[in-house]
Image (cartoon, rainbow, N blue to C red):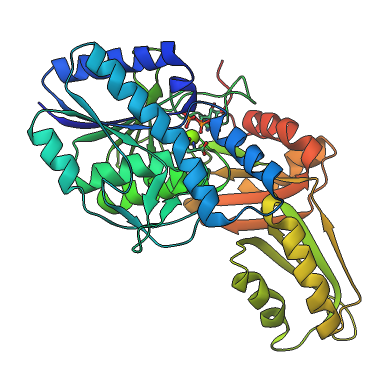
Amino acid sequence: MSLIVQKFGGTSVADLKRIRSVAERVAKSFDQGNDVVVILSAMAGVTDDLIDMANQVTVLPDKRELDVLLATGEQTTAALLAMTLQSMSYPAKSILGYQAEIITNCNHGSARIVKIGADRIKELIEKRNIVVMAGFQGCDPEGNITTLGRGGSDTSAVAIAAAIKADTCEIFTDVDGIYTADPNVCEKARKLSAISYDEMLEMSGLGAKVLQIRSVEFAKKYNVPVHVRSSFSEEEGTMVVNEDSSMERLIVSGITHNKDTARITLKKVLDQPGVAAKIFSPIADAKILVDMIIQNTRAEGLTDLTFTVSKKDFSKALEIEKQVAKEIGAEKVFGDESIAKVSVTGVGMRSHSGVASKMFTTLAGENINIIMISTSEIRISCIIEEKYAELAVRVLHKAFGLDKD
Ligand code: ADP
Ligand code: ASP
Ligand code: MG
């Protein structure tokens, strides 16, 4: 008998028929003698619809109220699954984020979990209930409802698994595992039987939305084995685990792309101490995350500085920098939203050279211009024109020998 956390994503609970299939799968695990805690997403498309509705009311919805609204998506599916299980004579109880004591900071819209009480869940399990928890939501120390950022139910699931010391955390989704590239973009992508936390952290951070990055951070920190698998088949999926010696050590294990990026360039900025701080401090104050930064040195003590942010923060960041440019005397500020980031990742890169040159040569072979480059020990990323993102994924996948036969 094990303690299992099972998370089902939006497509898996898209309608009542699918909720019934989820109930049957959960019931099967319960009948095998396991204790089961289920974490649910909202029905596919519901979170987007709720955001649209809020934007119809006002251009800038209050973040606190938006979270109250968004949390209803997961509340709906949790109640419906609990009812479905009860109709099948199973002892199920739904529970919302605040009831499960998922305490977060007060950063509405992308709150971070700071503490989990979990006593309520443990009590329900001890009484042999199937606990059905609404994912994606928590509450701040003042009791305000918060949400954990898009894709946040993954994080709810792994965090709960860590808090209750579950034996495993199963993430049921619309693909049957983690692939060497998004299987919906690259049909030659191969399913991995296992991937290390570090590689998955890179892939999630670079746009592979199959797992929200914060869920992988939790999994790594608390050593939670995560099994990503399909809700539509019984097939084994991909284990996300600690790197071990039996793991296939590919130099490059995955190609990712992310279209949610935009760049801002400040031209002819004075090349002297304090200027970068003036450019980035107001961006940080606005709680905007900066991804890549490059600075080109020019002649006569001047420099051009370019950085990227996510598309949702683009207009705000551009507005801020127009102001900054006036203050620091930059010649010009401009932005570009039609870019994408494509990356190659792999732990084997630590001990191999030539990956970057192969990546650049492959992109050049398709006449794809590289706008920005950044690297880490186990990753190389290039910013390119958005229209080439899918093509870039496919050619890199092939060039690094990842295509399935
Ligand atoms: P859910 O609603 O179940 O949370 P998501 O849409 O958030 O599902 O995540 C699953 C999607 O992640 C897949 O449909 C796939 O398009 C995408 N994806 C991106 N990169 C990968 C990858 N390397 N392996 C598997 N899926 C990926
Ligand atoms: N419903 C939320 C979203 O669409 C959370 C999730 O599905 O994980 O982002
Ligand atoms: Mg998701």
Residue sitting at x 66%, y 60%: 292
Image height of 192 relative to 296, above or below: above
Residue sitting at x 10%, y 20%: 33
Image height of 327 relative to 53, above or below: below
- Relative image position of residue 379 (x, y in whole percent): 56, 50
Residue 347 seen in the figure: no
Asked whether, in this view, residue 347 is left or right of residue 401, the answer is: left
- Relative image position of residue 128 (x, y in whole percent): 10, 28
Q: Residue extending furthest bottom?
A: 273
Q: Nearer the viewer, residue 199 or 45?
A: 45
Q: Nearer the viewer, residue 164 or 396?
A: 164
Q: Quadrant of residue 81?
A: top left
Q: Quadrant of residue 39?
A: top left
Asked whether, in this view, residue 153 is left or right of residue 268, the answer is: left
Asked whether, in this view, residue 126 is left or right of residue 325, the answer is: left
| Quadrant containing the N terminus in the rendered view | top left
Residue 147 seen in the figure: yes
Image height of 203 relative to 73, above or below: below
